[in-house]
Amino acid sequence: MTTDVRKSWTTSVSDVEDADVFIRGYSLGDIIGNMSFAAATYLLIRGKLPTPGQTKMIDAVLCSVLDYSLKKPGTVAARYCVSGNPSMVAGLATAMLSAGEYTLAPDSAGTFIRNTYDTHRKPGASIDECAEAAVDEIRQTKMRVGGFGHPNFKYLDPRAQKLKTIAVEAGVWGDVCDWYEAVHRAFIKRVTKPEMAINEVGMMAAILTEMSFTPDEMTGLALLSTFPGVVAHISEELQSKTRIRTLPDDIVDYARERKELNRDMAAAGWTA
């Protein structure tokens, strides 16, 4: 008599045996020393070995964020966190939870690129005419465009342009990337903001979409890129021995109205 036991978990990412660990079927012992971190990252996420060009691109992506001083909310939040709870793990978790809609995460840009490309890019048609039609719809529906604009960089974001240069050299630049740039050209023309650059998160999203990464995977890579900087900031904060950071009063506008509790409670219907 046999019993049908259904597996509750299925994974092809890795497997552990008594004497070895296998990553996507490859011995970890063989990977160590023979593959770069960027190549191993691609293997783990995409499930196949990368080409040298793909590896070069992922290495560039992993170096594209690194750190943004104390202008990144996650870094500041992490340092505040460990001033109260001196723990590397707590600080890292805090920094990761601060990434999202308005900073660091390229998933919204990746989703935007994929959706507009699939909807508006017509084979054989002018890419700029298709992009202009897409921008018209974007403006009508007030859709948020991920990856456009930066508080410091105007006209060109040097980080984004370096990613593009490497993508072209590595052979991973393609029609999807051209599409994103065409949408950008049409958008800044429509809104009359030529200074609005494609930022590094937007360029990252375009290139990773071309490389078939999902939006969620893109965000994972962006977070991985920022990890070294966060580790460095948390370490610096821990070594400073600063305890319980607070905001100085001169940068906070406190409401100074004072109220009478007993009077207001009586007015609200409370009895003594």
Image: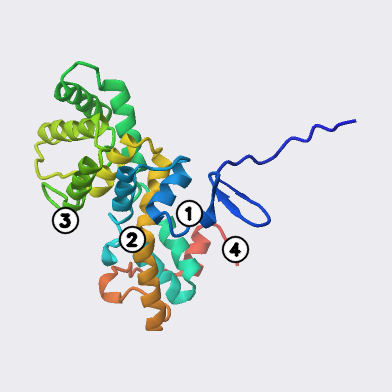
CB atoms of marks 2 and 4 within 8 Å: no
Instruction: From this view, report whether residue 182 is shown above or below residue 227.
Output: above
Badge 1: how crowded within 10 Å, few (<14), some, or many (20+)? some
- Amino acid at circle 4: Thr
Residue where numbered disc 1 is placed? 31
Residue 188 % position (x, y):
13, 36
Q: Label 2 to label 4, Cα distance in Å?
A: 46 Å
- Amino acid at circle 2: Pro
Residue 238 % position (x, y):
42, 78
Badge nearest the viewer, 1 or 2: 1
Instruction: From this view, report whether residue 173 is shown above or below residue 239.
Output: above
Badge 2: how crowded within 10 Å, few (<14), some, or many (20+)? some
Numbered mark located on residue 271 in the image: 4
Local secondary structure at mark 3: loop
Residue where numbered disc 3 is placed? 152
Which residue in the rendered view is the most extreme toward the bottom? Answer: 241
Q: Label 1 to label 2, Cα distance in Å?
A: 36 Å
Residue 131 visible, this orientation: yes
Q: Is residue 67 left or right of residue 21?
A: left
